[in-house]
Image (cartoon, rainbow, N blue to C red):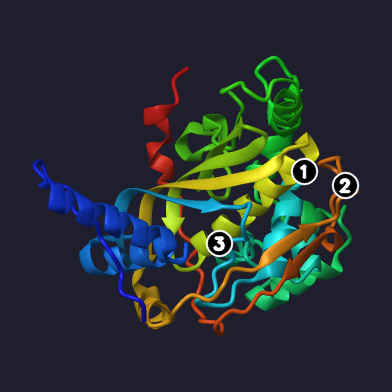
Amino acid sequence: MMARTQIILGPKRSLKSLRNLAGQANNMEKRHPEYQYLDLLDEIMKNGFEKQVFGHDKAVKSVFGRMMRYDLSKDFPLLTTKKVFWKGIVHELIWFLKGDTNIKYLADKGVHIWDDWPYKDYKIAMEKGEVPNLTQNEFIEKIKNESVDSEFIKKWGELGPVYGRQWRKWPAADGRIIDQLYWAIEKTKKYPDRKHVVVSAWNPEYVYEMAKPGTSMALPPCHTLFNINVTNGKLSLALYQRSCDMFLGVPFNIASYSLLTLILAQVTGNEPGEFVHFLGDTHIYSDHYDAVKEQLERDPRPFPKVKINPEKKNIDDFVFEDFELVDYDSHGTIKADITAVGGFDEKDRDKFIKA
C-alpha cells in the first residue's frame, strides 16, 4: 500500500528543508486524489476524539474542520477502495432536483438510503398502538405498493422540508415560494463573476426545537449549503457539510455534489472545474471501525469518468438515463449499517421559541 505523506510546518526552515517540503508537495500532487479521503479516515481512527451519539448507544470518533478538493476536468471522484452505489447517487440527486421530499420515488427505484427515518417515526406510532405492526421491509413494501396520493404515503413517506424543498420551494415570510436553484443557475449564466451564488438547505424554521410542532425536518441538513464559482470559464462548487459520516455518507456526498457540479456546468454553459468539500464534524461510527480498517488496507484504482447527455440544458429535464458511468473499476463492497441518528428533546422547545 502506498505510504501516506504528511507535511509538517514549523516556524523556521532551512533552504534544504524548504526544498524537501517542495519535494513532498510534488509527491502529493502525484498521489491519487482518493488519498485525501483515506488519509482523513486514518487520522480519525488514530487521533479522533471519541464521544457518545445523542439518543443512541453508539459512539463516534471525530475531528472538526477539514477540506478535500477534486478536479472534475480530469475524472470523476467515485471512490474505488470500496464499491459505491452509483444508482442511488443519481436517483437521490434527481429527487433533490425535483424538490421532492417523499421517499416514494426512491423506494420505487430501489434506493433505500432514506428508509430508516420515516420508519423511525412509524415505529414510535406502532409502539403506541396507533398503527398496525410492520417490519421495516413490510413498511417499505407498503410505500412501494401504495399510490403516490394515498394517505399512507402522504403521512408516512414524507420526510418534511428537507433538501429538495429548500432548494426549489423555500417558503418566504411573505408567502412567496423561492426557487433557489433556478435563481442560482440564472444568476450564474448572466453574471458568472459574482460571488454571492449560494444555495442553502438550512432553514431554522424547520430545524428541531426552532420548528413549530409537527413541522421539523426528519433530519436537519447535513450538507448545509453550497456556493457556485465561475473562474476562466470553469464552474466549481464548494459544499459546507456540518455532519460527515465518513464511511457511509461522505463517499456518497462526494459523488453526489461532484455530479451536481457537472450538471450545473452544463446547464450554465461552462466547463467543469473543482468540487471543494468543507467538512464540519467529521466522524466514524463505532460499528464502522472494522469496515474502515478493511478499507484502509486497499489501494485506490483510477477514477472513472461520467458522461452526461449533452442535449439536456434545463435543470428540470434530467432523468437517470442521461448519466453514464464509464470505466468504474472498484474494490468490492464493504457492508455496514446506516445509523439513523438525530432528534431532540421536546421539553427544550420552550427555551428556543419566543412569542
Mark 3 near mark 1, Cβ–Cβ under 8 Å?
Answer: no
Reading the image, the residue beneath label 3 is 124
Of the two numbered discs 3 and 2 on the same chain, state the one appearing first in sequence: 3
Reading the image, the residue beneath label 1 is 266
Indicate the quadrant where residue 168 lies: top right
Q: Under tag 2, what secondary structure?
A: loop
Indicate the quadrant where residue 59 lies: bottom left
Instruction: Bin the neighbour count of mark 1 within 10 Å (Cα to Cα): few under 14, some 14-19, many 20 and up.
Output: many
Q: Position of residue 216 (x, y in %)?
A: 57, 41
Q: Amino acid at mark 2?
A: Lys
| Cα gap from disc 3 to disc 2, whole angstroms | 43 Å
Q: Note whether 44 is above or below 179 in the view shown.
A: below
Mark 2 near mark 1, Cβ–Cβ under 8 Å?
Answer: yes
| Cα gap from disc 3 to disc 1, whole angstroms | 44 Å
Q: Under tag 1, what secondary structure?
A: helix
Q: Under tag 3, what secondary structure?
A: helix
Of the two numbered discs 2 and 1 on the same chain, state the one appearing first in sequence: 1
Locate residue 57 relative to residue 252 in the image: left or right. left
| Cα gap from disc 2 to disc 1, whole angstroms | 8 Å
Foreground tag (3 vs 1) = 1
Of the two numbered discs 3 and 1 on the same chain, state the one appearing first in sequence: 3
Reading the image, the residue beneath label 2 is 312
